[in-house]
Amino acid sequence: MNESPKSATPHRKTRVKPEIIILALLIAFPSTGFVQKYAGLIGVVGFVATVIALIVGIALLEARFTPWMRRHFCVLATLGVAGLAMGFVILHPLEDNRGPGKSSDRDEGLELAVTRLTHGQTPYYPSNTVAGPLSILPGSIILAAPFVALGKSGYQNIFWLGAFLLAACHLFKDKALALCLLLVPLALSPAAQYEFISGGDLIANGVFAAILLLFAVESWSDYSSQAWHRWLACLLLGIGLASRANFIMLVPIFGGALWRMAGARRALIATSLVVLITAVITLPFYLNDPAGFTPLLTRDKLAGADKTLPWASTAMIGITTLTAITGGFMLMFHRKEITMALFFRYCTIVTLAPMACVVLLSTWVNGHPDFSFMRDRFGLMYLFFALLGWGGSWFEGTVSPRQHLKL
């Protein structure tokens, strides 16, 4: 007997949204330099195609496995985080024992900075055999201190990845999507895998910057939130943005979004407080020894292009600054309702801008695609903004009330 139209399972139209392709490209980009180093440009093409195919495949097949993931979320989340912890404990010593110049020194540098700070010394040391000049701002040192006290700065990656899972659950209201946003990019990204195993701080830095922005925007745009929530959010965000210089560029995006979401008064108060906290944390270290304030040397990473074009690094910084300011004004005067997805997309663009500029310039100078700047895994700083910005489009029908913050 034929099924009646009412009892028949509705046909689900499968389509690939542009947002899914963008998400796949943003997941792949941080690893392009890593892949080019070992597999050349052909390897990069194959890698990017593979990432796109897998992300699209998951999107098309998600209805078959997401119900099971939602039912067993607690078990899967526990196994996922425990697996990350076990992988770090087992693999990190192997990577670390390769020695100076052969292994990443981000973890050693951060641990040395925390140790020096606890001894009353400036955390900004001269380059030595243990680690190169420290490029991070004091906020990263403060947030890493508890994990250094536990024995390894790399533990913070495990903690913040777990926090990212909870934040994604909170934002998207979909446990299966949150699990996929945590595990799939890690599985597909050689850059993220190496950064995690080596104990570098780029993963943690990208996650806590995104989570603290989420906390601050939600606290200040929700008129029912308690005052202490808002002040705590500004304190934590000020510390979080005082982690790397490029994250300070997100202040205009934060201010512009709040202006549109919560009004001019709240936006001015919150933004001013965040800037003040960032300055109070950072300036004493700079004023104590301007010449020895090694985060200023990070411009040298962009200055390699100056050998070909003397103005290149200045132009890249200018473009990034202009992008941040323009993005802030666009959010401030946005005609439609501001969503958290839109907010994080703007954060992604601002954080990605200097990396894209370097890759494009290097490609133009060399006459062929050149992703070598990405070998140091800088793209991981924007990755978690991108996951929160485009991740909600990955699964069909995933809509979160918290993605739509009303005035």
Image (cartoon, rainbow, N blue to C red):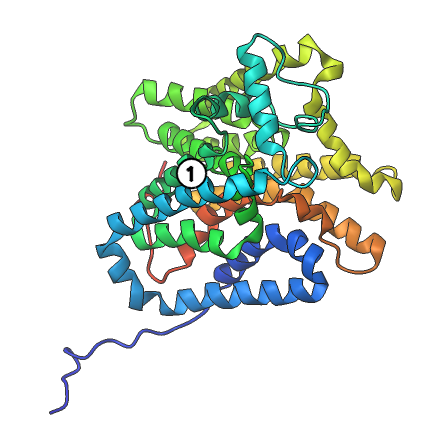
Q: Is residue 281 above or below residue 365?
A: above
Q: x and y percent of residue 194 in the render?
A: 56, 46
Kind of residue at badge 1: Ile
- Left or right of residue 49: residue 102: right
- Left or right of residue 188: residue 307: right
| Quadrant assignment for the C terminus | top left
Mark 1 residue crowding within 10 angstroms, few (<14) / some (14–19) / many (20+): many
Q: How many marks overall?
A: 1
Q: Which residue is at 43% across, 71% downward?
A: 15
- State the image quarter where residue 127 is shown: top right
Q: Which residue is at 88% across, 44% downward?
A: 308
Q: Which residue is at 42% across, 25% downward?
A: 150
Q: x and y percent of residue 211 in the render?
A: 43, 35
Residue 19 visible in the picture: yes
Q: Which residue is at 57% across, 58% downward?
A: 25
Of residues 270 and 120, which is closer to you in this image? 120
Q: x and y percent of residue 274 in the render?
A: 50, 21
- Left or right of residue 36: residue 143: left
Of residues 232 and 127, which is closer to you in this image? 127
Task: Say which residue label 1 marks.
Answer: 158
Of residues 179 and 306, which is closer to you in this image? 179
- Left or right of residue 400: residue 157: right
Of residues 227 and 88, which is closer to you in this image? 88
Q: What element carries label 1?
A: helix
Q: x and y percent of residue 35 in the render?
A: 65, 57
Q: Is residue 212 above or below residue 62?
A: above
| Quadrant assignment for the N terminus | bottom left
